[in-house]
Image (cartoon, coloured by chain):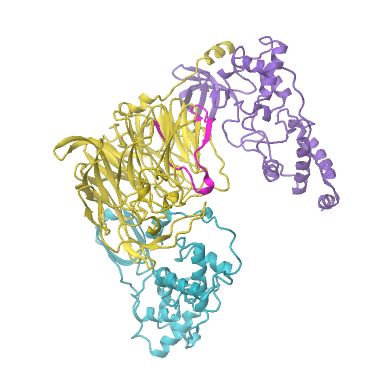
Chain colours: A cyan, B yellow, C purple
Amino acid sequence: MLRPVIFGLACALALPAQLFFEETIPKTNPYTGAADVKRGQQLFLGQCGGCHGPQGEGGRGPSLQRPKLAKAPDDESLYKLIREGVPGTEMPGSWVLIAREVWQVAAFVRSLGRTAEETVSGDRARGADLYRTKGKCAQCHVIAGQGGGLGPELTEIGARRSARFLRAKLEQPEAQLPDGFVQVRVVAKDGRRLTGVRLNEDTFTVQMRDLNDRLHSFLKQDLKEFHKDWGRSPMPEYRTAFSATEMDDLVAYLASLRGGL
Amino acid sequence: MKLVIFLLAALSLNAQVPYDRIRGADTEPGNWLTYSGNYSSHRFTRLNQITAANVRRLKPAWVYQIKAREKVQTTPLVVDGIMYLTEPPSDVTALDTRTGRPLWSYRRPMPKGVRGCCAQINRGAAILDDMVFLGTFDAHLVALDIKTGLVRWDVTVADYNVGHSITVAPLAVKDKIVVGIAGGEYGVRGFLDAYDAKTGKRAWRFWTVPAAGEPGVETWAGDSYKTGAATTWVTGAYDPEQNLVFWGTGNPGPDWNGEARKGDNLYSDSLLALDADTGQLKWYFQFTPHDVHDWDSTEVPVLAEGVVHGQKRKLVLFANRNAFYYVLDRQSGKFLVGKQFAKQTWAKGLDDSGRPIRIPNTSPTVEGTKVYPSVPGATNWFSPSYSPMANLLYVATRDEGGIYYMGEAEYRPGSQFNAGGFRPIPGEEPTGAIRALKPNSGELAWEFKLHTPPWAGVMSTAGGLVFGGTNEGDFFALDATSGKLLWRFQTGGPITSNPMSYLSGSKQHVAIASGSAVFTFALEEQ
Amino acid sequence: MKSTLAAVLCSGLCLAQNGERLFQGNCALCHGPRGDGGKGTNLAQPRLPRAPDDEALFRVIRQGIPGTEMPGTRHFSDDDIREVISFVRSLGQTTPPKVEGDAAHGAELYRGKGNCAACHTMGGRGGAMGPDLTEIGVRRSPGHIRTSIVDPEAWVPDNFLNYRWYSLIPDNFVQVRLVARGGQRLTGVRINEDPFSIQIRDAGDRVHSFWKTELAELHKDWGKSPMPSYRGVLTPGEIDDLVAYLVTLRGGS
């Protein structure tokens, strides 16, 4: 999905590798004192908390309250990850920070790992069953290449989002929608009415996937009406559909989906 | 046979584009002799074969793809049937405009230590007499023989190891080549240079940040002038009658933390009027004193004439990154008119001298401050266009805000010296527009909305059209008086350059660089 | 395996000897048995412009130089190439042959009687019909340069079939004669060509571009050159002087 805002940023400051002419990255974090962690927390709040939660508990970004971070097993890799981001995901690089500040954020992130990891009760197997049957989730979501393409892919969702986030999503689908995700409703000049999710858009055309998972491409001049329902989602809420135990089971199943991570 | 050839060979062409030809560029619209079309930076073509009535028949003529994978931001030049374009990082290629086939190329290997804030691109060459001039990413100025692309001379302008680079298209003025420098994110000290075109010897240098003891240095607290930046990375304008070069300057360094550099920080974010022969400063106007938002005033200055405040004057029209449009008196540098042309939340307005009246709490903070416009600003390096026919100034505008962060200022030569940064505002999808402004007042005549904030400039034509490009690859033509869309073509790559137009044979063509290619268009034969 | 073992057991001298064998068999045809040039560049010098370090020289030997007659060597193993590199570098350590002649007088002849700048460029100036001479002293041996002056058609390529996939300017020289349908006749040097168009440069340094459909005749004069022979035009002593001058043209090196 195109993310024009980030694209615009990237255009303004496409970052060649030569951007950071610092000395070689030390293998271990040289800034781990209490003052560093505190400063790291201040920076984290401003620049990372928006996605990772103010205490790193997760949200749009994964929870960082873990002793082991799969993509950053050691200090050097954590430094690089904060500095360069994770290509192909919504995690941007942070060229805003100077080297010392990156280390301070890293020190704070590591301190989060020492807090308790969230516990997820619930039966995964029953959750998997609910996913297929009562939830009908595969109608709109893909796991390991199977399912419908209307909503986000869930193959690694347990690694990308915290269990708390997933539960909240099931109860209130329209909170915290992904970047660039927008429900669209069109009325074409030929009378066709469609609702779906936007795939791509430019000044003159729009491409969408309708609720039956079919792709459509329109010239804007061929549309009578074109509505972008920001903050809306075609996903139904499941709070009333599932019992409390069923919700636990489904969340446990989703939290277990980590792909290769 | 051989003898005949032998004798003929003795007569070879010499001066191809003398200064007077560039000065009279408007009289030969079939060629594009300088970056902005003419010295007044109008980027307006007097060719009128392509019109509002027939532009729907505009089709690609040929495409040229560059060797590198970097994006092309060049404005090609065309002289007598040959197109001269620059390719990233610092190459020049000559193409036959009939067929699009290469005739020669100059390829410059980049040393390992080059660095820049953004991308290793090049925005165009300059031509004077029988030479093509190129500013290089490793901060050299090179003169090539126009026939063969072989090097005549190659001089070092600055040291790339501390962050200098050249991406700007130089400007050929009389017998000199004027070239600016980039590196404003590296704590360099900015300057504008002029070199003798024949020998490459430097004729003058104007430092955009004064040194100790020079007037203006008192606007920099302590030693902060040493890393003042205020670079000069977009091609300016020239008035032959006044013999003045007009050039914009960039942000003061470090970008987002002004604590260590209290003061107005002259001559950052300014328009300079320099004597073309000596580089002496005749006047300046500063758009954003003590800038903490990185709003470089390195936009293209447009020279025009008009009646403002009851008097016919020579004017400079300037749509600034800070979201204000300015009209200045070209003779005195006096502020005449200022009007907001995009959303902005940092200033209540401009006072009678053109100085912004700042709104408190709009500076960057550690936690982040939301301000419009964003760091890339309401407009940027890409070209505006002035149509003397429609009497409108067309500006590609960005309607975008940002969250500005203040960080620590830590200078190390060769490393970025920004002290902070910015992020997009979450939950917002910013847009853009082509805005047509009435030049004497800044009043909006019309706007054409774009899906995302543009990185491409515009060109207007005597056929009554305005050409522009989008990030999503659309090259389009609007009616110059109404802004109505008349034609578009999907080029498949982001357009981050400026259009130009020329004759090939007797047929009008329009060219635009897009993605890693240069497209040319002409009317389909009926 | 065998050559690796050999490399392990070999000293530098040993490597160079193996390299010489490979060189004689594969490279000497163009570069000369002592590497001092012929159709190929003179390698008997301390600095090779296209191979400033061994990594670059490895690439040149392995891949060739696109657009020129220097082919790659797919049949060489990595060790083979390293041995050849060793030998080539040893060539650069010999003293270059002394060239008879007065280079200063040669420079005058270049500008005056020879009128060479009418067709050749040097330092970005001159006519563009013939090859650039800015670095000719590095690229060709004195013997090759002398031959080019008295017998210009000796070294003109016969065809590009062995090494060229498409026209890569400016190394591929061929004289072209054409007759346009309107009657215009032109002789010149080909700049570029494709199935549908051709661009040439005439003796007046003008560029012409034609669609092939506009041409009545198109002849590529392989092996021909518009350069006149200077035998008889210059005395043998003057030729010596001119050669001595051209040998000093080493570009920025």
Asked if the magenta segment contains residue B166, the reply would be yes
Q: Nearer the viewer, residue A254 or A72?
A: A72
- Residue placed furthest toward the front: B213
Q: Is residue C70 left or right of residue B221?
A: right
Q: Which corner quadrant holds the C terminus of chain B?
A: top left
Q: Position of residue A134 (x, y in %)?
A: 40, 83
- Residue placed furthest toward the left: B310
- Segment colored magenta: B144-172
Q: Position of residue C62 (x, y in %)?
A: 70, 43
Residue at 53 percent of width and 33 percent of height: B154
Q: Judge whether residue B38 can be spotted in this image.
A: no
Is B256 situated above or below B299? Answer: below
Q: Nearer the viewer, residue C40 or B215?
A: B215
Q: Position of residue B217 (x, y in %)?
A: 38, 47
Q: Position of residue A185 (x, y in %)?
A: 28, 65
Q: Quadrant of residue B107?
A: top right
Asked if the magenta segment contains residue C225, the reply would be no
Q: Nearer the viewer, residue B307 or C198?
A: B307
Q: Nearer the viewer, residue B266 or C1?
A: B266
Q: Which corner quadrant holds the N terminus of chain B?
A: top right
